[in-house]
Amino acid sequence: MEEVCFIDPCWLAKNVLNPSNALEYFSSSPFYDRTCNNEVLKMQSKFRKVTQDQLHNMAPRIQRIYCSRLTNALFYLYNALDLYLERRTFDVRDGFKRKSHADDSCYGNDSDLQNALKIMNEQA
């Protein structure tokens, strides 16, 4: 009976064989099956090793969150102030007065205003 064994002297000259690299050594053998589960796992994990330097923080900084929320709040405050300034009138005898919804034709009916308020509340 003839025995066939695999020895790679070049690989053994460069590396010391231990349990952590035994699969790598055996994969250079002509008897190694490239479709086996070990090879599939090796190929799947080959490009997953990412160093800490390559990672970047995905969460926004707290400063960005506060800035975004303040910007949104100021946007709605400016819109409310513009709406108020458009709806007020000045009379010398009576002073400043605010127009009612009935006097204001540019805003349509109350359902349009309610829909706009609903959309603004959903965005906040």
Image (cartoon, grey):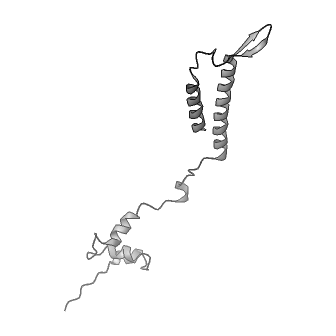
Q: Nearer the viewer, residue 83 or 25?
A: 83
The residue drawn where x is 33% and y is 73% is 27
- Decide: is 106 above or below 93: below
- Decide: is 53 above or below 85: below
If the image is split into quadrants, where does the N terminus sit?
bottom left
Q: Is residue 23 left or right of residue 110?
A: left
Query: Across the whole image, how many numbered discs are drawn on residues?
Result: 0
Q: Nearer the viewer, residue 3 or 35?
A: 35
Q: Is residue 121 left or right of residue 24?
A: right
Q: Position of residue 67 (x, y in %)?
A: 66, 39
The residue drawn where x is 35% and y is 72% is 38
The residue drawn where x is 79% and y is 11% is 94
In the picture as drawn, the residue positioned furthest to the left comes out as 1
The residue drawn where x is 59% and y is 26% is 113
Q: Position of residue 19 (x, y in %)?
A: 43, 79
- Decide: is 38 above or below 77: below
Q: Quadrant of residue 45?
A: bottom left
In the picture as drawn, the residue positioned furthest to the bottom comes out as 1
Q: Nearer the viewer, residue 44 or 77?
A: 77
Q: Quadrant of residue 80?
A: top right
Q: Nearer the viewer, residue 62 or 4?
A: 62
Q: Position of residue 36 (x, y in %)?
A: 30, 72
If the image is split into quadrants, where does the C terminus sit?
top right
